[in-house]
Image: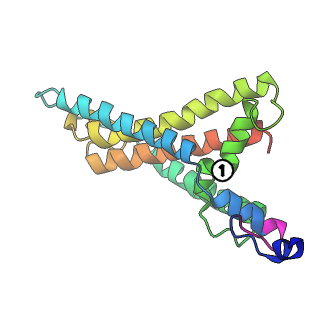
Amino acid sequence: MQENLESTPRTSQPVYDDGEAGSAAIASQLSGPLTALVGSAFVSGLLFGLVEFLERSPVRGKHIAGTAAWGPHLALALAAIVVVTVAHARHRRRLGTRSGRPWFRAPFGTQAALRIARAFGSGGEPVRAGRLLLALPAGALFLFCFWRAGVQLTAGLDPNFTINSWGGPSYAGALACHYLDLFLLAAGATWLIDRILPA
């Protein structure tokens, strides 16, 4: 009886042929609480921006030349290419070529959730309070980026919201520039959290 139980394959948990594949599979799994938290920030931003749009002024503002800042955003676009390239290379180095998941899912993965839980003292030994205090502002910035992305999507429908903004006066231009900025800020916040919290 014991031999039959030991010889029966277990299907409730995945079996990996080596540590690299196991780490890649764990990292590729999305964390429900983290995904819900980020989604809530984005949706609340959408609603806030919708209120801003509904309360818009009927008077059209005047465009001021030079406010679009396309030059600096061209430089930021090149920086974004560098960030994506480095992040992709780092993802392949840490998880191997068999991860099968894009690197930008890592901040929402189960490994990230475990590191955050450990920082708060659950699921392992708590880290020093100094590390946690350093990680909290970066985490707040990360969530703010998704909140601001939601705001831009709905509030930007008001021409006065984008007429003198970066990438303005068009809705598409302002959306592109602001999303580029938010991507870089979120990537920087993710990098800081990765450096601060223990693996």
Q: Is residue 22 visible?
A: yes
Q: The N terminus lies in which quarter of the figure?
A: bottom right
Residue at 66% x, 43% y is 113
Which quadrant of the structure image shows residue 67? Answer: top left
Residue 15 colored in magenta in the image:
yes
Residue 131 colored in magenta in the image:
no
Q: Is residue 7 above or below residue 139?
A: below
Residue at 76% x, 30% y is 121
Q: Is residue 63 above or below residue 9?
A: above
Question: According to the image, label 1 marks what residue?
Answer: 110
Q: Is residue 62 visible?
A: no
Front-most of residues 154 and 168: 154
The number of numbered discs placed on residues in the rendered structure image is: 1
Q: Which residues are magenta?
A: 13-20
What's the amino acid at mark 1? Thr
Q: Position of residue 189 (x, y in %)?
A: 62, 39
Q: The C terminus lies in which quarter of the figure?
A: top right
Q: Position of residue 47 (x, y in %)?
A: 30, 34
Q: Main secondary structure of the magenta part?
A: loop
Q: Position of residue 43 (x, y in %)?
A: 37, 39
Residue at 28% x, 40% y is 154
